[in-house]
Every structure is written in C-alpha cells, then in structure tokens.
Image: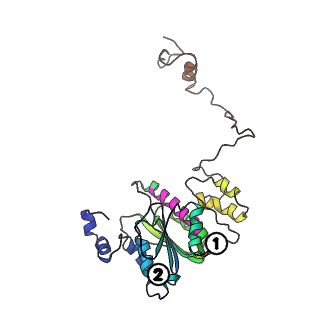
Amino acid sequence: MGKTSKDKRDIYYRLAKEEGWRARSAFKLLQIDDTFHILNGVTRAVDLCAAPGSWSQVLSRRLYEGREESADVKIIAVDLQAMAALPGVTQIQGDITKLSTAQAIIDHFGDKKAELVVCDGAPDVTGLHDIDEYIQSQLLLAALSITTHVLAQGGTFVAKIFRGKDTTLLYSQLDIFFDSVSITKPQSSRNSSLEAFVVCKKYNPPEGFVPQMINPMIDNVKLLTEQTESQVNKKLIPFIVSGDLRHNYDSDMSYNLSVNTDGQYEWKDAVQKPICPPYEEIIEMTRTVSLKNAAIVKPGQKGNEK
C-alpha cells in the first residue's frame, strides 16, 4: 500500500493496517461473503493471482476460525510471483493457464477438488477503458478455464471484472457453467473504479463438457475445438473464447496459415484487381527507375511530361 495523501484519507487503507490485512482489498472479499455467504462450510479453497495475499489472509482467518480439526482445511494460493508465507496457506508459484498448475492443485487436495475458487487478479491498467476491460475479461476467462479443472460440482467461483459494454457477454459465458451468476460491487470498492465482482454459485457444467486449458489471449479457437472429441466443447469453446455465437471465424483473432503437404503457403492474387488505381503510375515508376530520379508529375500533366 502506498503512502500518498489519498491513501491516508482512505478509511479502508487505515483499517487494513490497523487490523493486520496486507491490502485494503481484503475488505472486498469480506463484504462479498457478508452478502453471499460464500465461505460457509468451505474446507478446500483456491486463491488465483493471490499476491500480495490479502484474500488468502481472509480465507485463512475465516476457514480455520472455530474449527477443532484444522487439518481438514486446505487453502492454496497461486501466483507467478512469490509472496510472504501465511499460516495454513500452501503456495504454488505457477501459471494459471498451464494444466500442470491445475494438476498440482488437485494433487494437494488429495485428488479432491476445491469448493471455492476466488480471483482478485487484474492487469496493470492503462487508463484506456476499452483496453483495460478487454484484458481483464481475458484474465477472467483464463481463471474460469483453470476453475473448470479444479472446482467441484456445486462449488463457487468469485472473480474481478471491469464493468463495460461486454459485461453482459461475460455474464452469458459464465451462466453456461453456473446455476447462479451475480455481479456485485462491494462498499470498499471505490466508486471511481471500473471494477466489480462476479459471484458464481453452484458449478454445473453442461453434460458432456470436457475441461480444456484455454489461454484466450493466444489460443487458436479452431485448434482448441480439434483437440477434443466432445461435441459440447466444439459448440461452446468458440463462444467462451471469443463470444462467437455462430461458430464462424472471429475477425479479431489471428489464425494459422493454411499450408500444403510440403508445409508451404500458396499465395493467391486478388480475384479482381482494381481498375486503373491512382497508385498504378508510381508503382510502374518504382519498377523502372528509382524515386530519386523520377520526374515530378504536375497536376493535369501525363506521364513523365516536363
């Protein structure tokens, strides 16, 4: 937490230090729990993008509170960067877009799955709302991807979103996997911030869905659908990755070139080239002489007329 005058005036900043929380964001999870009771009865929880660890702190304090057999509680914090140790929390320094990370989580739970997955991760904001919203949505979908591997049937998923024009699309994507999807903005979340949180309860994926590890920022939708024999996946993956309802190509995605049996790409000319384009003369000039020596054509004159 910083030391600016704005922070000093922030009541949640001061309360976080007074109560021993690593960041003011701890109050966001506490307030979400007060409203939705997501921590009730939970013994296996995963905190994605956990550093610096304020949400893991909340899980540690709340899940171990009043329990005689603390060994029944298992909490895993996942992040690419290391963070200071927390009592009762196991850390995995790994990438949430890797299948190995999902398997490490399941192994730690003794081949069981989590009852709760939370994610307060966010990119470094640029201030350009459209870009920030898009990148955050991709991070959320990556978190959802690993969640489909590690979350037990009936479990709960909570993650940060940036409110914007595509919020309804995200809601529809999440609604495929959960019986209940709510969007909330805790009181401790600043009004000036675009952030809100999705609270997804009762994990219930479509029958026949096979979890696949998806990195929506780089993955090829076509290849993803070819990697599974599940017909449900073939229909859902294009919508989950790019919001495509028609299962056609996405104009914002880059696709691999179609190569022949020799691994070569065959270039094809345009079906109908432009007739007498305005740049035709300059193209012809560059083929015969350098632009330095080319004659300057004045308006109304033809060719190399001087």
* Disc 2 secondary structure class: helix
Magenta segment, which residues?
Answer: 132-148
Specify the quadrant of the image occupied by residue 2.
Answer: bottom left
113 left or right, relative to 300: right
Q: Position of residue 119 (x, y in %)?
A: 48, 68
Q: Position of residue 265 (x, y in %)?
A: 68, 38
Q: As drawn, which residue projects farthest toward the top?
A: 306
Q: Is residue 201 visible?
A: no
* Residue nearer the viewer, 228 or 111: 111
* Disc 1 secondary structure class: loop
Q: Are marks 2 and 1 in contact (CB under 8 Å)?
A: no
* Residue nearer the viewer, 111 or 114: 111
Question: Is residue 147 part of the magenta span, yes or no?
Answer: yes
**Residue under label 2:** 63
Q: Position of residue 190 (x, y in %)?
A: 35, 68
33 left or right, relative to 287: left
Few, some or many residues within 10 Å of mark 1 (<14, 14–19, 20+): some
Q: Position of residue 208 (x, y in %)?
A: 71, 69
231 left or right, relative to 44: right
Dot placed on the residue nearer the N-terminal end, 2 or 1:
2
